[in-house]
Image: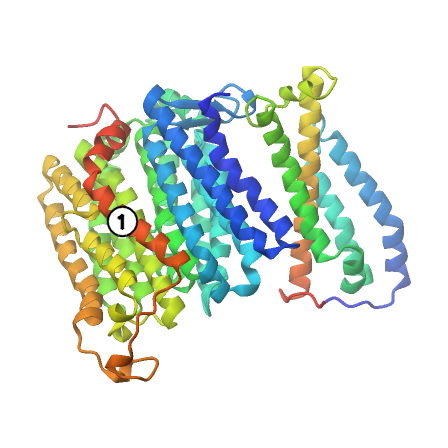
Amino acid sequence: MIITYEDIIIKTLTRVLAPFLQLYALYVLAHGHYSPGGGFQGGVILGASIILMVIAFGLDTARKRLTEKADIVLLCIGLLIYSGVGALCLALGGNFLDYSQLTKILPVTVAKARSLGILFVETGVALGVMAVMVSLFYDISTGGLPPER
Amino acid sequence: MTYEHFAILAIIAPLMTSFLVLLLGWFRKGLCYPLTLAALFVSLISSIGILDTVMAKGTIHYHVGAWAPPWGIEIVVDYLNGFMVVMLTFIAFVVAIYSKKSLEQEIPDKIVPYYSVFLLFVAGLIGITVTGDLFNVFVFLEIASLSGYALIAVGEDGAPLAAFRYVIMGTIGACFYYLGVGYLYSVTGSLNMADLSQILPNLYHNKTVLVAFALFTVGIALKMGVFPLHAWLPDGYTRAPSTSSAIIAPMATKVMAYLLVRIFFTLFKPYFAIDFIPVTQFLTWIAAAGIIAGSILAIAQTDLKRMLAYSSVANIGYILLGIGLANQMGLIGGLLHIVNHAFMKGTLFLVTGGIVYKMGMRDITQFRGLPKKMPFTMAAFTIAALSMVGVPPTCGFFSKIYLIMGAIDAKQWFFIAVILMSSLLNVVYFFRVVQMAFFKPYEPAYAHDGGDYEKIKMDEMPLSMLIPTLILAAGIILLGVFNGDIVSNAIQHAVPVDFLR
């Protein structure tokens, strides 16, 4: 169980760092499909920012910001975005994950549609990875015991 | 819309529902069960559609993301995995119907994540079976294994330890497989199975390819629970919740057996494993040792679930023997036994789950008077036991006959003796249960309600558990009666054409 203890340096540094960490995560995510980076890496950085909050402010504070239930919901939404994009392509008459089919609902060229398709998938992956990392960290730091309600 | 889309639908229906179950389960617990059933029903219908398409039009090639095969991931379904998928989805669907009451009693507060993991496990296994890409196999292998560990770990006391052993062994197995894929990729630059089988024959003398083949064999044998590498299996099956045993025992090891066939006879040309490095010959001896050792160890058990687990070790020996004999009859026997054993073990574990549900025990010595209490359950048990022994109208007889014919074709007389011997050992450990339950005089000391003979009333397990059990038990007989059709319509075409007759 991680508890709070007063250290102004750590707390202030975390406050300053967290927005930049999350912004950087979004940068890595948004550029992932045509430069180094991607959903997985972006998700890990996003998750790290929340784990940093747990370390600096204690588990209880962090769990008020992002409850375990919300975490699981984010996880499912992330994974459903991924598979949902694939299934959408299937529903539009193409093969599973065939992003070129997205031109039927988006006013873009085929190349752009593929690019957007992978971006949607990366977003889903990022959410999923972040949620799993945070969920694992919560589980380890509570010793696997269920949260107090 | 072509029928080819069934191939992907069989995977993504359970996969997507798995996330949906976890999401909606937080708000409404009761939704999990119907959603699971619906997903597996879609999967079952799709897999029947797949098999139907394969039988009508030949092999299905499905390009995920519409990328052409050597670069993109390809889903390939032919006769070999077509019938496997139907078997997997059917058993998953039947076990899912059964699961409700059993889980409500055994793990009432973990039902939501359990169903999510359950669906993920099924999706992973279907994925391994239908994919035509070596690396994709690894991805689905990890999905199925990780969820398999979780399915075991939620069980009774000792389950986490059993699951931990399985994690260690399973990770080593998956790791070996992954190394094998890496080695092949380093020499060929391809991951597509069909593409690799074209490139590889020129490289059979390459040492990297030989190492890759060895890593595949050992890695898959570990995950399959082949005799000397079976240490994770008995504990895992015994400690898991009833539903987990009933889903893992018939499916996980069988899919690995399928993967072994795929790698031995499709990825590599059959002559590579048979003549070039005679690994099949070696495997037959391992299989024979496993059949005898598994049967003897099963006799030593008094815990019904543990006995069934050791019996699984012996039956994996049969399947491996069929693969190792590597002639037409032998391989038909091995493949038929994959299906037959899945039905038999499924029935037996469902029966065990029912006994645990009603009586709270699974010690064979306490089974006296049980047929009076649970007549239908014990009838299903007896059918499955007869089939395990190999009594004619049931399916177990026919796969053994094919194996014996395969051994005759290979002129390996020793293995005929092994099969007959193990049938006798099967009689010992299954009829011990039957005799204890049906024929031992009933003594009040063994009654759990403390009453005497007259007080035993029929007290069957709930219908939602009984009907799936009886469906699988009926399946055992139907598979036996229609085995000729199954072999001539599906399995015969799954055997490589350049096989020895």
Q: Nearer the viewer, residue B363 or B70?
A: B363
Q: Position of residue B371 (x, y in %)?
A: 25, 68
Question: What residue is at 87 percent from the left and 67 percent from the top?
Answer: A6
State left or right for residue A90 relative to residue B94.
Answer: right
The residue shown at (52%, 49%) is B34
Q: How is the image coloured?
A: rainbow
Return the residue nearer the eye: B190 or B362: B362
**How would you rate the neighbour count of disc 1 (Cα within 10 Å): few for under 14, some for 14-19, many for 20 or more?**
some
Disc 1 marks a residue whose amino acid type is Ala
- Is B58 placed above or below B220 here? above
Quadrant where the N terminus of chain A is found in the figure: bottom right
Q: Is residue B142 visible?
A: no
Task: Quadrant for residue B79, please give it.
Answer: top left
Q: Nearer the viewer, residue B146 or B88?
A: B88
Q: In what quadrant of the picture does the C terminus of chain A appear?
A: bottom right
User: Does B144 sit left or right of A28 as displayed?
Assistant: left
x and y, in percent, of residue B153 in the image: 49, 60
Q: According to the image, label 1 marks what residue?
A: B474
* Front residue of this view, candidates B144 and B12: B12
Q: Is residue A121 above or below residue B101?
A: above
Q: Is residue B311 visible?
A: yes
- Number of labels in the image equals 1
Q: Tell me where residue A40 sits by quadrant.
A: top right
| In this view, B260 is above or below B397 | above
Under tag 1, what secondary structure? helix
